[in-house]
Image (cartoon, coloured by chain):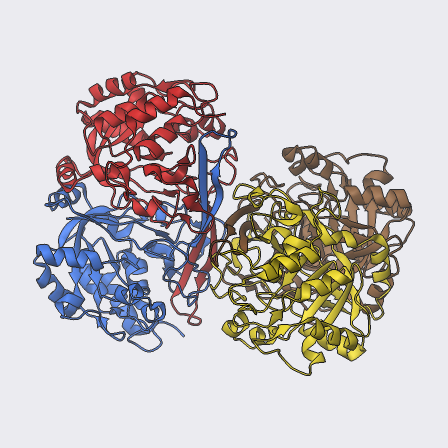
Chain colours: A red, B blue, C brown, D yellow
């Protein structure tokens, strides 16, 4: 089985290989210039902060559907330990084991490959068990602060949660952009809300995981046209799952990460942000979402904060 | 052995228990108001971003001196895995095991206890192996964005790196504040640079770990007087180590975390920031440093970014 | 809530504290003398080996019912890595994270405590997050080789699997002993088969976990009377679960581990052994089941082998 | 760089591919027949048990020389936790993260590959990050009980510890065999003692790790001639390290594991066994050393016991 012509047609249109030089490992993050960050800071009006990360805990969003992607196991290695003798100041220390893509996370550009290639045309086998991604590991994507724009698709459609089979289309994005009252532009980080997180927050992990609304294979061209820096949403799979086109699995991942070189975020909790934006009738804000810089990581937990 | 009267005298002067109510779990983070964040956003002038986290890797700052606090072990659970069949889009996935306080991190208020108590007077045994900290876990410290001020003590003293036995005093802070050209005020996050990180960056982990310059037991009163929201620096131990006063171990931890309820950050890489601030002759900026919200965590990795 | 008088009555009758000295950390393993091992070797007739450990994998017996007891996460840290240059011998290396009691395991004597005490009357708080069990950790239980006797309760009762609510009684043990054709004696390691493992092997983890047949609170006296060295079975909970006596949770654990100082084994796969013993009409064999010696471990994986 | 003709010459002479069928995944373990195990049981005379595993702890034999092979990190997930309410029986539970080859272990046949092949001629890329070794994982090597023979090379040479540059030759093995007073034969598990473990036990990890005495590239032919089932020793590297022949790295691994299909054991503590054998003047015993059956594991911890 190979990827269908339809996929390759889109791929050609959104491809950014070489755009920032053949040595580039950061892709569309290059679009976040100092001027854009400066401007993003001016979007802050109330100073209200909205954290977007899910709590990290063993009872997280993973259900076992994705092998090896384990929920955080939080353990103690010291507990009020008086290491300097009885009556001295005591310390507690903890350790964790978790899948880097288990909770609220960024996919690195290297999270997927297709046809033996990763972003910028490098061979996929530059990712190894010994060291992870030699190129475009998540540690190469530092300094993620920019203007964030919430495209609240669920709210724009007047729905609490998009249906499991709903593929978010460019039209959906356009409608949400209209609701947002601001045009998505170069260097923005776009947060797409489907409302799917409500299923998890209501305690139904299985319904959250599958089937899932998500981005349509038609959206990468929209993001490419706007020169978006990164996109995150409130689902486990990011794109609609199961896929729109039979036997074409993870096409959005392949287009965003491999072809465009654009970071994707998943499992972002956009519920409180949706409320706050609706209340203030503005959907643009300063967004800080720097990845934990795991060397060679193909993904990483992130603790994003929107500042309104 | 019990803590000496000298310690208890200072403790009384900096104690914040009950200040934000008996149910409070956030301590001095309460000092970061929306107005302060709004104001912090106005400090952004160039839009230049400086990430402050060390790369997360097995060759990290830990030397084994602190049992259980292991450097990140980054492993792969999938490597260009064509899970949907040959020729399909392939995925890579990773997992990590690490001490939550192993790299660039925040101590939660519960990282230390003394005399059987944690912040706000709660019993220390509310921290358990099963669930970690029931109160004041790091997941209670969300939304850390404020004005950051670099107090570049090493630069103010004209030294590359403070000597291993140098305790950073209130006078040192005052001199660095003068260099900074801004007065530290309520809600600020203060970054204290000793230059010690240079030893690690030069490849000498042992020299980085011990002996270490760091904050004097006299500094908590200074931070308390200014109503600082949090303090981070570029050392493994935060406070001078071995300690100034014989047999009084970790007094700064106990005063900051337990008495004041003020978060501490360690292993922050302030080298690039020091250069940037000196170049622009301004030492205040927007700082985003939200913790990874491990439920019950007594600490957590953080990926702080300064925006100048 | 405190433990009922009924529990304390049995506890008094099976208590072994001080029997092997106040410094003892091994309990009934002291009953395995060299003479017994020598004799156990003579039980080998065919040389047929039957391994009793379940495969260690992420799809293991744990369902999340017991917090923190995670199935093995097997990861790769090197994969055909030519560390000495292209064309050289390549190495693969793996790492694991798992609960020590997640799969086929021994409980250490310290796995449970009651009334603030562990085996031999030591305080329960000698187990700490920093170092685990200071006394009677699983590393103190070395050299477990003895005569094994299969008490095939399910077969003796003519059942494939005991019902979920079936408490294995002394009468059940006696009937199985009759089937076995050998009297259980001092130093033996007794394997009690309920058939419950069939539920897991058939793919139904939930049914395996709960409800579970298992040992009755009446069995510790039977084991004590025979001076058994250790007991293992083919269930997740070892004892009947939910318990026979309302609100008396884990009484068998408390009696076996704390009072008698007798190791318990869980999740042992006795299916193949049951077939082999029935075929040869003999239920005694050489059993080697040495624990992985985790220092301070309150349990450990074990890979037991019966040699017939 | 490719492997030299000298290597390929030996490889041809010791190759066992196809010997037990093209589907075989167990190699020389096939040589342990029931008759051999039956006979091995008769070597038990005193019943004295000698455990051969090092304690599993963070202060283990790994020094960081081998990336990713981390010493065991033992953590607590519950500590005297009264999960059923105050006053009920309390449980402690632990978790571990460790390199499967970090401590006393077996290499699986898949631990190394050369020229793109693993044992029995299968492609090396049948080992993946997702699932580990599809063939000849350590879970395929169950039931390791046989006659063990200690070849105490150090003692036979009258040395406490072999020098770091000492390659153990067939002549050394022959001399130790003479000391042992028994001929090594088909199905035996041979334990080769260099005394190197004394360096670790004396607290010098670096000296233990490197340079290390170990097996010469000439020994695989000796083991092959005797049809040995497996070989273990008391070093980190198994074979002499750095190697005898410049730029020929890990030739013994490649010959034993890939060509012969013979398991190797490392970091076995043979000190107490050496004393016991010398005292009784006999060097053959029953050895039980079943691997922890990690599915797809390229190695595993083992807790071997010799029964004299």
Quadrant in the picture for the C terminus of chain D = bottom right
User: Residue C101: where, in percent of width, then height?
Assistant: 61, 50
User: At x 45% / y 41%, what residue is drawn?
Assistant: B93
Among the 4 quarters of the image, the one containing residue D212? bottom right
User: Residue C21: where, in percent of width, then height?
Assistant: 71, 72
Q: On the rendered structure, is B23 left or right of D248?
A: left
* Residue C174 appearing in the image: yes
User: At x 24% / y 41%, what residue is drawn?
Assistant: A21
Q: On the rendered structure, is C247 left or right of A196?
A: right
User: At x 35% / y 29%, what residue is drawn?
Assistant: A255
Which one is in front, D262 or C284?
D262
Which one is in front, C48 or A221?
A221
User: Residue A295: where, in percent of width, then height?
Assistant: 37, 50
Q: On the rendered structure, is A286 left or right of B263?
A: left
C302 w.r.t. A143: above or below: below
User: Residue A292: where, in percent of width, then height?
Assistant: 34, 47
Which one is in front, B114 or A191?
A191
Hey, which residue is sitting farthest bottom in the picture? D158
* Residue C302 appearing in the image: no
């Amino acid at each position: 089985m190979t990827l269908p012509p339809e996929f390759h047609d889109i791929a050609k249109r959104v491809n950014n290989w070489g755009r920032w030089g053949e040595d580039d490992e950061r892709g569309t993050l290059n679009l976040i210039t100092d001027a854009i960050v400066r401007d993003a800071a001016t979007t802050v009006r109330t100073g209200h902060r909205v954290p977007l990360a899910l709590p990290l805990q063993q009872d997280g969003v993973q259900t076992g559907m994705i092998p090896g992607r384990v929920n955080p196991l939080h353990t103690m290695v010291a507990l009020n330990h008086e290491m300097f003798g009885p009556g001295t100041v005591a310390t507690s220390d903890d350790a964790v084991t978790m899948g880097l893509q288990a909770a609220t996370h960024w996919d690195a550009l290297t999270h997927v490959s297709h046809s033996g290639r990763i972003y910028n045309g490098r061979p996929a086998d530059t990712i190894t068990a010994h060291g992870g991604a030699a190129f475009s590991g998540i540690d190469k994507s530092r300094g993620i602060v920019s203007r964030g724009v919430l495209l609240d698709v669920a709210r724009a459609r007047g729905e609490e949660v998009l249906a499991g089979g709903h593929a978010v289309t460019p039209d959906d994005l356009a409608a949400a952009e209209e609701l947002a009252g601001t045009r998505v532009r170069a260097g923005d980080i776009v947060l797409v809300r489907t409302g799917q997180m409500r299923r998890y927050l209501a305690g139904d992990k299985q319904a959250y995981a599958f089937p899932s609304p998500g981005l349509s294979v038609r959206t990468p061209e929209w993001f490419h046209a706007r020169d978006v820096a990164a996109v995150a949403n409130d689902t486990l799979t990011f794109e609609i799952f199961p896929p729109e086109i039979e036997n074409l699995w993870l096409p959005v991942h392949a287009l965003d990460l491999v072809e465009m070189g654009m970071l994707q975020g998943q499992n972002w909790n956009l519920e409180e942000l949706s409320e706050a934006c609706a209340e203030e009738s503005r959907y643009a804000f300063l967004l800080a979402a720097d990845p934990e810089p795991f060397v060679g990581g193909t993904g990483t937990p992130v603790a994003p904060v929107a500042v309104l």
